[in-house]
Image (spheres, rainbow, N blue to C red):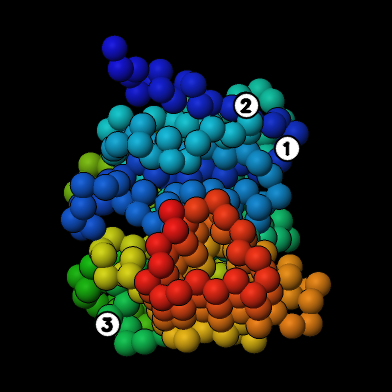
Amino acid sequence: MSPSVEEFLQDLQGQLNYDHSPIAIVLAAGHGKRIKSNISKMLHEIWGVPTSVRVIKAATKGLRSNNYIAVVGIKAMEVADAIGGAPSGLFAYQAEQLGTGHAARVALDLIDSAKNVGDIYIFPGDMGLLTEAVVTDFQKAFDRSGCGMMILTGIYDGDPMENHYGRIVRVPATDIEGRPSDNDYDKVIEIKEYKDLLAITGDYLLEFNGRRYRYTKEELLAIKEYNSGVYACQFDPINKHIRDIGTDNAQGEIYITDLIKKFNDEGIAVNAHPALVNEAVMGFNTKSVLYDMNNIYRAAIYEKLKDLITFEDKDDFFIADEVVEQLLEMAEEHTVLDIYIGKGVYIGPEVKLSRFVTIERNCILTANMTLGEEAFVNQNSVIE
């Protein structure tokens, strides 16, 4: 008899380190309707690696903590199998997809609140370009801020009417009566979704910390800073207030963004911090965006290697991360590599390269193999 989802996940469960280390919660339960694929969105690959796996790797390395909880749902066993078990990794099963807040709640239920729990970081599982550096920078900003919640943001550089992301609405310099906002200045009041902005007529008024602030529709639309879906929270307030969020919305779901009002009402500061690079907070819902993300990743690989080895075509190659790292180490050891990579070459993670290697165009190398010095691989060769 096949195991149930719960039984399958139990075999992969690790144990969190309760030494006040941060815990990354990775939301990998959705299937992705707009991706129009029988494969879970979380298993679609960014440069040969499932996007959910890349997010976990970037999150744990960036936070310098092995603690993570992957929330799985649709095709849970396939996603969990791809992620694999880890000593400090857990899987939370979200049987029904009832929103990001509900997913976070399911993950928080696995944490022993009586122990020494660190900060909570929440990441979408489709953010496959997320990097260790971006996560570390975000963590440092959160630690410096002293706030209870921080949102990682992107900066939209284009026509505001084409920006369909949720805007970060901060406290302006003065309130509706012209008085300085003082210590409240720049704190986050709310995230306003694009479709809700379009429905505004007249001035938009918000209350924060007992004072009122006025915005025009045009001012709100012009906000460049948008919500990436990555959050940092102190454990106690999120563990308490995530359970207070209701489903009073058209979708009948529980959203993490509703925490902002809960925190503000309790006098717990909420702030936001822009990502080091916008590309790192890209997610995808369609095949075309996934394609763009892979091209961005390829361009980053080319930038690392372009002065170390020779490419016939910078826009048509694949070299697995493990091989890239090997090449960078070789460059540290040797002044000259003289490696040639032809157009359309695919090099898998188990291939080891040596100096003076030539791989002609359209070769596919995926075997566990070493190419010795001066090895020559003729075009269209396939070694699996």
Question: Earlier along the polypeptide chain: callout 2 or callout 1?
Answer: 2
Quadrant of the image occupied by residue 186: bottom right
Q: What residue type is labelled 2?
A: Gln
Q: Residue at x 35, y 23 (%)?
A: 5
Q: Which residue is drawn at 61% across and 64% down?
A: 371
Label number found at residue 15: 2
| Residue 213, position as x, y percentages in the image | 44, 71
- Locate the C terminus and report the quarter of the image it occupies: bottom left
Q: Which residue is drawn at 81% across and 72% down?
A: 333
Instruction: Kindly report the distance in space between the C-alpha atoms of the residues bearing marks 3 and 2.
Output: 46 Å
In this rendering, which labeled residue sits more in front, label 3 or label 2? 2
Instruction: Kindly report the distance in space between the C-alpha atoms of the residues bearing marks 2 and 1.
Output: 14 Å
Q: What residue is shown with label 1?
A: 20
Name the element at disc 2.
loop
Q: Which amino acid does label 3 sit on?
A: Met
Question: Earlier along the polypeptide chain: callout 1 or callout 3?
Answer: 1
In this rendered view, identify the residue nearer to me: 201 or 19. Answer: 19
Q: What residue type is labelled 1?
A: His
Camera sees residue 69: yes
Name the element at disc 1.
loop
- Are the residues at dot 2 and dot 1 in contact (C-beta closer than 8 Å)? no
Q: What residue is shown with label 3?
A: 161
